[in-house]
Image: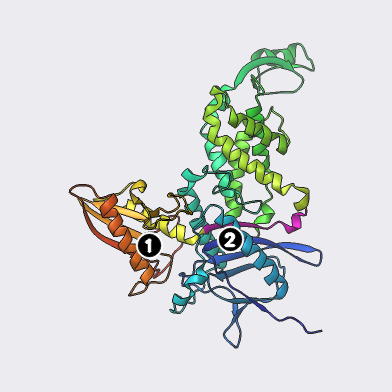
């Protein structure tokens, strides 16, 4: 029987991603972490190169340090058949899940005719540092998209059971911490004789210990005035976060540190609700939905908290589904569409420019040029990425996640011509001048890891 040789795989979609996949060899299972790098980064992947100058990875070997494998958008690498089959299936699911909230996600294969031919820089950058850079970009994107999280049930955080929910955990905990004072107000201070010490022993209790030895001690402690369903929903959600298995994060110390910090804050909140019992996950989902349909006035400050909670509970419910009960098959990902990250980076950079302002987003939507009875007028609208005003001068910018060309392709030229004409006809105010319109391409001379997202070079 002929053995099947290595098979080529190529990430051809507009997503940068960190993916954790369990690999089993014999009786041992270990998470292998894959990273998909933006194609404009100059660092090489950690794949090997054979005599034909083709990139490849050997079969996964489990070791004390869990493996990390770096791939790059549009770069071909050979994998053993079993790993190819698994990874190719996961790539399709990641793309499908990200596309739920980004309908215009780009297939990079459409852009293959203008691939950057410049050689990669061979750097001895640690693989985990590159993965942390990808993570920071995904986190930056999620932070910038936070205001759009609740657009629909298929919103930014609804990435199916495989979306690693660290950003969602952080958002829930941060929002709930803002209302800790309201949580405390739900307690009352009581003095009672109890069989075990609670809170602190009162002065009379201390006296009675010596004067009248008894199995009951007078203590002063806080207790819930009411056991409202909303608090039990919050308690259930906090329990889920506190029990998240850190071993699923593989060798990524920065992710483990993030989870440890989230759990630390979670446990502080759990201590406030320690007297309450948690719901089952399905009961908590039902109560969460009921509360959101008709939120009591006294609990309206928890509206956003409950929306985060429902997504965490639904994610946990999917993981507990009998059809997905085999935990050894659970893979996860943290992902973001690269073209959207590029747009957000540009917007952040322009915010720092003094002497000018970024125009309101509603000024960037134009009525489309075509009459089409098959689509709604809203779908036929066109939108440019950024409008910047300096004095009376207006500058329009459209971000392109593609390789720079001295002469832009004809479709881009038509697009820019339409944007310029449409802006003058539909948006330009009296005394304003449309000064110019630009295409903005990614270009990286040198990339460095930083706690801050640096401004792009171009």
Q: Is residue 437 magenta?
A: no
Q: Is residue 299 left or right of residue 361?
A: right
Judge whether 49 appears above or below 196 on screen. below
Kindly identify which numbered label has been placed on residue 95.
Answer: 2
- Residue in the foreground of this view, choosing between 125 and 403: 403
Kindly identify which numbered label has been placed on residue 182.
Answer: none
Q: Which residues are magenta?
A: 326-336
Q: In the picture, which quadrant includes the C terminus?
A: bottom left
Q: Secondary structure at mark 1?
A: loop
**Residue sticking out furthest to the bottom:** 51
Residue under pointer 1:
456
**Residue 353 in view in this figure:** no
Q: Is residue 194 left or right of residue 128?
A: right
Q: Is residue 327 magenta?
A: yes
Judge whether 331 appears above or below 188 on screen. below
**Image point (75%, 47%), residue name:** 321
Residue 444 spot, x, y in % from top left: 40, 68
The alpha-carbon separation of the residues under discs 2 and 1 comes to 26 Å
Q: Kindly indicate the quadrant of the structure image that contains residue 189.
A: top right
Residue 398 spot, x, y in % from top left: 36, 60
**Image point (56%, 36%), residue name:** 305
Residue 280 spot, x, y in % from top left: 73, 36
């Amino acid at each position: 029987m002929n053995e099947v040789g290595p098979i080529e795989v190529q990430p051809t979609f507009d997503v940068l991603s960190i993916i954790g996949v369990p690999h089993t060899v014999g009786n041992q299972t270990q998470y292998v972490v894959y990273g998909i790098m933006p194609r404009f980064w100059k660092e090489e992947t950690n794949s090997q190169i054979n005599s034909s100058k083709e990139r490849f990875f050997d079969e996964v070997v489990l070791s004390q340090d869990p493996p990390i494998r770096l791939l790059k958008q549009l770069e071909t690498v050979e994998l053993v058949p079993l790993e190819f089959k698994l990874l190719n299936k996961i790539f399709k699911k990641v793309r499908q899940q990200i596309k739920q909230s980004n309908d215009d996600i780009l297939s990079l294969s459409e852009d293959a005719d203008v691939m950057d031919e410049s050689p990669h820089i061979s750097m001895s950058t640690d693989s985990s540092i590159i993965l942390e850079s990808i993570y920071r970009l995904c986190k930056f994107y999620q932070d910038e998209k936070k205001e759009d999280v609740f657009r629909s049930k298929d919103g930014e955080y609804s990435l199916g059971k495989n979306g690693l929910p660290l950003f969602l955990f952080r958002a829930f905990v941060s929002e709930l911490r803002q209302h800790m004072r309201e949580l405390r107000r739900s307690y009352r201070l009581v003095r009672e004789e109890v069989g075990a010490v609670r809170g602190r022993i009162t002065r009379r209790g201390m006296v009675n210990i010596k004067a009248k030895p008894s199995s009951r001690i007078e203590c002063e402690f806080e207790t819930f005035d009411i056991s409202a369903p909303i608090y039990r929903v919050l308690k259930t959600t906090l329990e889920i976060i506190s029990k998240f298995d850190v071993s699923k994060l593989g060798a990524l110390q920065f992710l483990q540190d993030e989870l440890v910090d989230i759990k630390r804050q979670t446990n502080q909140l759990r201590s406030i609700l320690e007297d309450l019992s948690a719901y089952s996950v399905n009961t908590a989902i039902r109560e969460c939905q009921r509360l959101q349909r008709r939120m009591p006035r006294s609990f309206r400050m928890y509206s956003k908290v409950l929306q985060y909670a429902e997504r965490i509970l639904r994610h946990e419910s999917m993981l507990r589904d009998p059809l997905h009960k085999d935990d050894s098959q659970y893979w996860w990902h943290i992902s973001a569409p690269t073209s959207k990250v590029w747009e957000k980076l540009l917007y952040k950079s322009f915010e720092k420019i003094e002497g000018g302002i970024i125009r309101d987003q509603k000024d960037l939507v134009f009525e489309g040029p075509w009459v089409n009875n098959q689509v709604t007028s809203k779908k036929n609208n066109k939108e440019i990425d950024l409008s910047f005003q300096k004095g009376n001068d207006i500058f329009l910018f459209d971000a392109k996640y593609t390789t720079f060309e001295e002469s832009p392709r004809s479709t881009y030229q038509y697009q820019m011509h339409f944007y310029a004409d449409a802006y003058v006809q539909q948006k330009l105010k009296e005394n304003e001048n449309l000064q110019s319109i630009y295409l903005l391409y990614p270009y990286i001379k040198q990339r460095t890891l930083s706690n801050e997202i640096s401004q792009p070079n171009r």
